Image: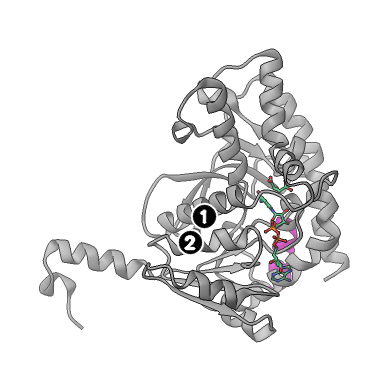
Amino acid sequence: MFAARQVFGAAQRRAFSVSARQNSKVAVLGAAGGIGQPLSLLLKLNPRVSSLALYDIRGGPGVAADVSHVNTKSIVKGYDPTPSGLKECLEGAEIVLIPAGVPRKPGMTRDDLFNTNASIVRDLAKATAEAAPKANVLIISNPVNSTVPITAEVFKSKGVYDPKRLFGVTTLDVVRASRFISEIKGSDPANENITVVGGHSGATIVPLLSQSGHKLQGEQLDAYIKRVQFGGDEVVQAKGGAGSATLSMAMAGARFAESLLKAAQGEKGVIEPTFVESPLYKDQGCDFFASKVELGPNGVEKIHPVGQITEFEQKLLDVCLQDLSKNIQKGVKFVKENP
Ligand code: NAD
Ligand code: LMR
């Protein structure tokens, strides 16, 4: 074996060690969908991804062929919708993103998707637990408040659950909260980073504006909170039955995956709000909760407490916790009754 130090100069050694660390396979399950396609494209553009594995019950290989022509280094492969195709797609993955499932139509809540999406996520979680038990699993499929506990229960039943590696992707709430405040304040949204805690549906989405230095009051504050909590409905209405947020969600999912890859590749201080198993409100029946989470090479490095909040925000949080505990229990019960 040669020592890199003896053979290469400093700059070459740096380049060598970066490329050696950037051996990251990322799998997308549901890759041919409204989120899956732009998400796959954004991952193809990410130099931290070395291999992109795309699976869907229909159209995975087609999307892979298309994305594979983009002239970045990573290798792209699409897999057949068979158990062996899914297994091969998952094997060796460092990150598994799951946007498989049906989206809302106008008039529906995310919970109305439970009956269809719970079994889709359960089955994909089973395959992931078997083929990639150590991967970071990023759940996008709704209702996230229930599909994350479903995934946890499946991993527990297979004896491979690691709470540090399971994430509900709530980044879109942060993206919206940041964009919407910039519209009010006339600031650059790229410089805004509003913390959003709780879960991912309606009243369980709690933006903590007071921690951002921005102040809104009265009706303007109410309207802002409502817009963040129900931003998803805005898109569902505008699409008029053709689905829910896909492009902004792809951006949010790609951002979260990028943060995990950065942390895995040694960057310190990478923090994103995300819905994880959390000690913060277990005593109130919420085993999962989104708050700021520091990411590291092993997934969750540190769960930050909610911190100082206003009385108004505390009231939002109280409502959130009531709804959230029911959503979580529903997911756990589903796996117990439908293993
Ligand atoms: P879509 O219908 O456009 O795409 C879903 C894809 O999943 C389809 O290509 C479908 O073939 C595939 N699929 C279905 N069952 C599958 C299975 N068993 N294995 C593999 N693939 C399967 O829907 P979309 O707009 O991409 O939304 C997907 C999900 O993401 C929805 O549940 C939606 O509510 C959710 N979503 C979550 C967030 C969030 O912030 N977490 C944001 C937007 C949408
Ligand atoms: C969103 O927040 O846009 C997603 O959860 C999709 C939806 O159903 O609103």
Residue 60 in sight in this render = yes
Image side of residue 259 versus residue 123, left or right: left
Q: Residue at x 64, y 79 (%)?
A: 86
Amino acid type indicated by mark 1: Ala
Q: Which residue is labeled 2 in the image?
A: 43
Residue 210: give its label: none
Quarter of the image with the N terminus is bottom left
In this rendered view, identify the residue nearer to me: 199 or 155. Answer: 199
Answer whether labels 1 and 2 touch (C-beta < 8 Å): yes
Q: Residues within 10 Å of mark 2 (few under 14, many from 20)?
A: many
Q: Residue at x 79, y 44 (%)?
A: 325
Q: Residue 110 location, x and y as percent?
A: 79, 48
Image side of residue 315 versus residue 172, left or right: right
Residue 308 in sight in this render = no
Is residue 163 on the magenta stretch?
A: no
Instruction: Report ligand 1 position as a quadrant.
Output: bottom right
